[in-house]
Amino acid sequence: MVNNRDLYRNGFVIAPLWAKVIVASFFLTLLWPASADAQITAVAGGNPNHLDLAIPVTASVAARCDFTIGGTFTVPDINAGFSHDFEIVLQCNVASRMAVVSINGGLLASVSAPPVGYARLAPYRATLNLVGAPGVTTVNAICDAAILIAGAAAPCSFRGPASPIQGLRLSGPSSSASGSYLRVSAVPYAGAGTLVASSTYADTLLITLSASI
């Protein structure tokens, strides 16, 4: 699992932020006669020789959602383009929503303002693919990193943070189904400015998960 304190040269930091634990509760109610005067004792071989005791049992299981995401990736040459999948393992007993926030809105070099004609922010895209239990429809969406920044004006279906009404929605449960991933990719760079030379291009993606309504 990626540690959100780790930084990779020309790469990505993947930071899972949220998980909800399961809560189960049980309630037992014993129904005894209303008063001591009405109490009846069963005696072996006697009459009565048995008692009927009603014990209603009710139980509830709270919504549970968590996930893991693993792997590391270093971009060897941003100018040449790249593509990499980070595997996601979902554990949800209800419908869920996953969302992503980009800190930099692209791969940003930690250098001072570049000269005229040069750039220090390389664009890329994020693809989120979620797979549920058998019978649950797989969902997939793509957004540019530039609109995954918190507060970006342009819409993105999975910009975070996740909430019961925000994020890419998986309509049913998922129990470690294979095939879920977060993909980061870019075509060969063709921006208006030449990328300034640096080995520190990086972005941090914050991933959140919520039970969905």
Image (cartoon, rainbow, N blue to C red):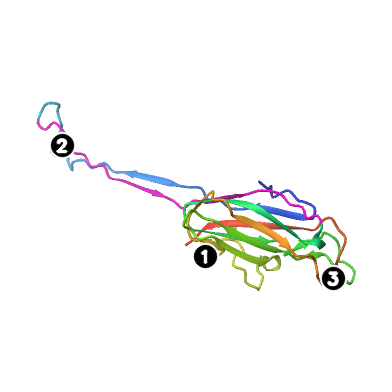
Looking at the picture, which amino acid does disc 1 mark? Ile
Structural crowding at the residue carrying mark 2, measured as other residues with C-alpha within 10 Å and reported as few (<14), some (14–19) or many (≥20): few
Decide whether residue 181 is among the magenta residues: no
* Residue appearing at x 82%, y 62% in the figure: 79
- Looking at the picture, how far across and down is residue 114, in whole percent? 87, 66
Question: Is 109 displayed left or right of 24 in the figure?
Answer: right
Looking at the picture, which amino acid does disc 3 mark? Gly
Q: What SS does tag 2 mark?
A: loop
The stretch of residues the image draws in magenta is 47-76
- Looking at the picture, how far across and down is residue 159, in whole percent? 62, 65
Kindly report the secondary structure that dominates the magenta region of the rendered protein. loop
Question: Is 201 displayed left or right of 136 in the figure?
Answer: right
Q: What SS does tag 1 mark?
A: loop
Numbered circle sitting on residue 165 = 1
Structural distance between the alpha carbons of marks 3 and 1: 39 Å
Looking at the picture, which amino acid does disc 2 mark? Gln
Numbered circle sitting on residue 193 = 3
Structural crowding at the residue carrying mark 1, measured as other residues with C-alpha within 10 Å and reported as few (<14), some (14–19) or many (≥20): few
User: Which residue was labeled with disc 2?
Assistant: 39
* Residue appearing at x 67%, y 62% in the figure: 126
Q: Of marks 1 and 2, which one's residue comes earlier in the chain?
A: 2
Numbered circle sitting on residue 153 = none
Query: Within the image, what quadrant is residue 99 found in?
Result: bottom right
